[in-house]
Amino acid sequence: MTKRQTPHSFRGLEVDPRRDHIQGPANAPVTLMEYGDYQCPFCGAAYPIVKQIQQRFGENLRFVFRNFPLAQIHPYAEVAAEAAEAAGAQNKFWQMHDYLYEHQDALALPQLTAAAALLRLDVERFTDDLRQHAYAERVREDFLSGVRAGVNGTPTFFINGVRHDGSWDFGTLSEAINAQLEKRIAA
Amino acid sequence: MTDVTSADQLDRLKAVETRGEARLSANGSSPLSAGVAAPEFSLQDAPDHSLSLKDFSGKRLILAFYPADWSPVCGDQMALYNEVLPEFQRLHADLLGISVDGVWCHRAFAKDRKLRFPLLADFEPKGEVARTYGVYRKHDGFSERALFVIDERGIIRWSYVSPITVNPGADGILDALEELESKGAAA
């Protein structure tokens, strides 16, 4: 049996402010990164928990979201991910991200277009971007970075670059973040 | 992430080691390692069709043993590999999933998850192929979550057994295939 030579938590997880979608301060002691799929019901369940976590840890937490659409089992996951990126190109990534998780049963193209209008995006540009798959490559890059980092399903969370294999209920996730926070404060 | 301490890395590696030891003692047999010739097999992948190791002679092959169809986890191991399949193919490898489930069960599972690679039924005698690869859990009646990367000459080049509850992801497979690729290029 060969052992893995490199701990697989350290590849491709570096936060890139020019490219990543980030909430919270750049110098926060703890970074929570989620690889998620907009059509995945488990990600939908994790969405309000992440909000609660962000509220609890405030300025001590930086949250990063990357796409991990499981497109074969979730037929709308890819178009939804591209929609969030298209909204991101108009500086409304998080608004669309939240909208998608709050409307997981309405991810078909006409519904996404309606969402774009609701969020006051340039709808023509948005639909053009989706039609031309302008952000498909970017979504795939996110996906592959996740695969190489050991993402094994959705949602997968990393806390300061280490995959969180436990449950992601509020209690467990806060405890794991707290442990990192205490380590940083002690250091 | 760059700011992860070496203590974190150490903790993580220790956890992996501990899980590995627990697994070996529970199982009683050890998985075949790199350098060993992969044992021949012939198993049904459909009610009227079988696949053998020799069918893949001259190609790279990934064998993914898993405990059972119908994992309740969203984005389970086979669903993940289904998404990563183009990467495996880019690295010139075919993929086979293997569990002790029968062909009809596999067929329903593959249809439901839209799997684009064959599932082999290690059904009768139950788990025989898993045994020959040293990854059968006789007390449970199903196989480990075990991965084997086999080269063009039928030699195992990498193997990995994951803790039964942890989806091993695809990063280890991709690392192994890339190593084969680079060695192939050097030869």
Image (cartoon, coloured by chain):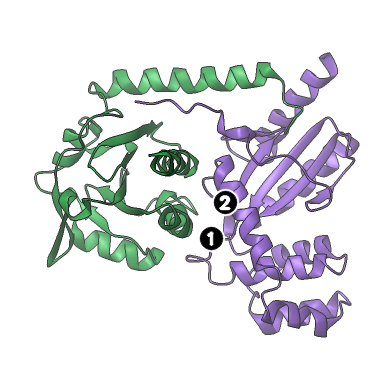
Chain colours: A purple, B green
Write down the chain letter for disc 2.
A
Left or right of residue B150: residue B92:
right
Residue A155 shows up from this direction: no
Look at the numbered discs 2 and 1 and tell me whether their residues touch, using CB distance below 8 Å: yes
**Crowd class of label 1 (few under 14; some 14 to 19; many from 20; radius 10 Å):** many
Q: Judge depth for marks 2 and 1 and give the one in front.
A: 1
What residue lies at 86% left-to-right and 69% top-to-bottom?
A90
Report the quarter where the N terminus of chain A lies: top left
Q: Which mark is residue B46?
A: none
Residue B57 shows up from this direction: yes
Q: Position of residue A146 (x, y in %)?
A: 60, 47
Q: Examine the image and state in which quarter residue B48 appears.
A: bottom left
Q: Which mark is residue A70?
A: 1
Q: Amino acid at mark 1?
A: Leu
Q: Which mark is residue A154?
A: 2
Left or right of residue A100: residue B85:
left
Q: Amino acid at mark 2?
A: Thr
Q: Position of residue B51 (x, y in %)?
A: 17, 57
Query: Which residue is at the front of the view, B94 or B12?
Result: B94
What residue lies at 24% left-to-right and 51% top-to-bottom?
B58
Left or right of residue A122: residue A106:
left
Could you tell me which secondary element the residue under label 1 belongs to? loop
Report the quarter where the C terminus of chain A lies: top right
Q: Position of residue A148 (x, y in %)?
A: 56, 43
What residue lies at 16% left-to-right and 38% top-to-bottom?
B39
Q: Earlier in the sequence, mark 2 or mark 1?
A: 1
Write down the chain letter for disc 1.
A
Could you tell me which secondary element the residue under label 2 belongs to? loop
Residue at the extreme left of the image, as rendered: B125
